[in-house]
Amino acid sequence: MPQIIISVGREFGSGGRVIAEALAERFQIPVYDRHLITEIAEKTGLSHEEVERYNEVPKSRLASRRVRGFSNSIEDNIAEMQFEIMDKKAASGESFVIVGRCSETKLKKYTGLISIFVLGDMSAKIKRVMEIYNLSENEAKALIEKKDRRRKSYHDYHVNSRWGEARFYDITINSSRLGIDRTVDILEEYIKARINNK
Amino acid sequence: MAAVFAVIIFVIMFIMIVIDKIERQYVTLGCGLLTIIVVFGLCMKSMSAIWDTLSFKSFATTEFWYQVTESESKGINWATIIFIAGMMIMVEGMAKAGFFRWLCLRIAYLVKCKTVPIFITFVIMSAVLSMFIDSITVIMFLAAVTIELANVLKFNPVPMILSEIFCANLGGSATMCGDPPNIIIGTSLGFSFFDFLSNTGIAAGISLVLCIIYFYLVFRKDLVSKDKNEKADISKLPKPSDAIKSKKNFIISSVIFGIAVALLVTHSLTHLTVATIGLFIAIITLITAGKSALELIKRIDYKTILFFIGLFIVVSGLEETGILVFIADFIGNISNGNAMIMIIIIIWVSAVASAFVDNIPFAATMVPVIQSLSASTGVSINTLAWSLSLGTDIGGSATPIGASANVVGTSIAAKNGHPIGWGKYCAKLAPATVIVLIISTVYIFARYL
């Protein structure tokens, strides 16, 4: 099999991470999400919690500054370390699934990249988040909005493409229409077609 | 109307620099272009204002290259730009030869790799190097070597990096070429390297001694090995000679650095301007670099050069439309002509502003303000210039975003597993900043009033 890098961007509560894990299992390749946090924690000696705290969150524009590629923002530095690790893995020829982290743009130079964005209906996302996190409807809605706002801000700061906008991904799919399992089936078909098309 | 547009463009530029969505050189160049078209072209309809601002004719004047009497410049400060570009080329050459890494390791070995002596020598080295070369380069190498040493000698590198950052900014305030605001102040008002050294340099020297004591007292517990039972294995440290990539290039770059220091120290005697020195240093670096010359040219930080050009145009917009005279009159009125209050305002307002926004645009804006203030109140321009220099240079140390060295140092620390947030940074360096600002204020009062 040629190298494939499946980038999965996702709205919070859309099941994007579960879909990414399922795709990784079907293609028998690793999925990098939390693993990147562990890798950075090991590399830098920071605690897992510390890295998690700054993971995929936007920096405060007013409290940070960038000079010749250096940034005082811890969020920026963690993000850059993740981009570097991602890039090294891709450059090594490894196939993998990567969740979020601007990967659809950062890894664009690799021909094996297949970029997916998973979205969902608000009602379905609220239901899912209520179940998983044991929250009320209002709390779930507020959490979804907060997480998505942060992801968009993080994404749009680090790359020039816009988070969740169809033209920047190979395929965008609403997981609420067919449910997670059937969404995975369709995406698997699409990825196979892309592999066979090479 | 021109004044209103000049202010709007300036404010937009400042906000966009802070927001950091568009690279800052595009922001200043875009705003500079707007100033030329809207302020000078459409509102003032003044071709002479455009030519004065672009200041191309300054290249053709003898004073630009050889200056016997002090003279002031207007518009784009090409002397600053040529000097910075020249020094960038020299520093690239030195870095390529392994000079800075060699120096850091050599000093560490000289003090037998003992933590407290390393701490003291490294902060002094940070201050001394920053007197001649940009603090970004100084911190880039010092912080990296500090982390390497900390890993082997088992101490926490954060206190040392924070002290190095602070002393780099402090060292920068001591000379004309140490910090961009000083280059702008010096070239705009016709000061020499020695003028700075004998005025701000003395304040910086006194402050450095007190700061080393302060940092030692604050950080002494962090400077001992984290685990007393764990013995540091010095043999794991790289040798200074390993840092030298080419002995020939190393010797050449050391000699060029020596020439640059000698020319800067003596430029009030030789009458060579910083523009001439910058150009000369760049030319000899490129000639001696041979085939690597192109690589050195490519590594110049063009973004900073372009940032400066755009910035000077925007500030000229404020200057030509009289806005800066208005600010100067305002300071003159609230201080009621009292020099002491003026000095306090200039030092402390500059410091607070520089702690949060880039001190380069601030200094560039304030130079015409103090010129006008001096003319209207009779307070010596020198006194106001040293106040501005100390305020902008020192104030930048208070927060992680106040100066370039802070950003670079904290970034290197974070990438190596030592994140330094605002809390950790300000808890130690904001009090140090206040101490040095008090010393500076007292110094200016005692010496010039």
Image (cartoon, coloured by chain):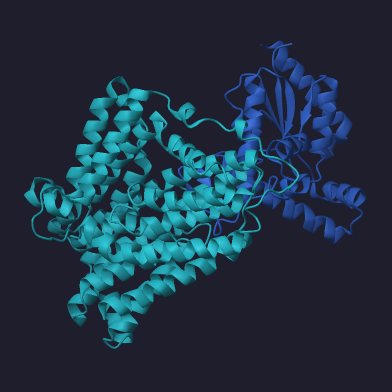
Chain colours: A blue, B cyan
Kindly tell me whether residue A1 is visible in this rendering. Answer: yes
- Residue at the image position 16 percent from the left and 61 percent from the top: B72
Q: Is residue B287 above or below residue B430?
A: above
- Residue at the image position 46 percent from the left and 36 percent from the top: B101
Left-right relation of B200 to A184 = left
Left-right relation of B150 to B199 = right
Q: Depth check: B142 or B124 in front?
A: B124
Q: How many marks?
A: 0
Left-right relation of B48 to A71 = left
Question: What is the quadrant of residue B332 in the picture?
Answer: bottom left
Q: Position of residue B274 (x, y in %)?
A: 21, 49
Q: Depth check: B234 or A8 in front?
A: B234
Q: Position of residue B443 (x, y in %)?
A: 34, 74
Question: What is the quadrant of residue B84 in the picture?
Answer: top left
Q: Depth check: B279 or B369 in front?
A: B279
Q: Depth check: B15 or A46 in front?
A: A46
The N terminus of chain B, quarter of image: bottom left
